[in-house]
Amino acid sequence: MPVDRESPEKRAACWHSAVRRGSFSLVSSALAQQSSPVNEVDSGGFTALMRCCVSGQLLSLLLEHAGVDVNASGAPDGSTALLLACRSGSPT
């Protein structure tokens, strides 16, 4: 069965794709509309904030959003955004 365009799975996939690409306009728009599954983990167990801590992109944008949970994680090793930022040298 095809995934509905508005399904939570599709919305999460689009959100994580925009974050991985570093799309400032898409991510900021989704945050402003409060339509982003901001603390949802992707298939690797990473939240958007965790991905941003590794890449350094969009980090301040996500940290300014009140709904971001800095302790959210689904990573197999239990990593959090803070731990990933320390490992990658992100200026968080």
Image (tube, rainbow, N blue to C red):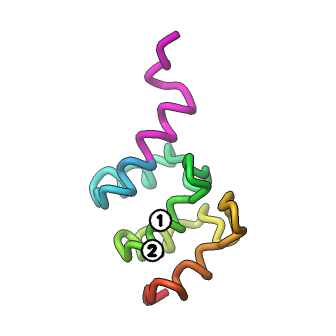
Q: Is residue 23 above or below residue 89?
A: above
**Residue where numbered disc 1 is placed:** 51
Q: Which mark is residue 54?
A: 2
Magenta highlight range: 1-15
Q: Quadrant of residue 25?
A: bottom left
Could you tell me if the residues under marks 1 and 2 are in contact, i.e. CB atoms within 8 Å? yes
Q: Secondary structure at mark 1?
A: helix
Q: Is residue 92 left or right of residue 20?
A: right
Q: Residue at x 44, y 22 (%)?
A: 5
Q: Residue at x 67, y 62 (%)?
A: 73
Taking the view exactly as shown, the residue that stands out farthest to the front is: 77
Label 2: few (<14), some or many (≥20) within 10 Å? Answer: some
Q: CA distance from mark 1 to mark 2?
A: 5 Å
Q: Residue at x 47, y 67 (%)?
A: 62
Locate residue 50, reporting x and y percent. Answer: 53, 68
Q: Residue at x 69, y 60 (%)?
A: 76
- Amino acid type, callout 1: Arg
Locate residue 21, reporting x and y percent. Answer: 30, 56
Q: Quadrant of residue 69?
A: bottom right
Q: Is residue 68 above or below residue 6?
A: below
Locate residue 4, reporting x and y percent. Answer: 48, 18
- Amino acid type, callout 2: Val
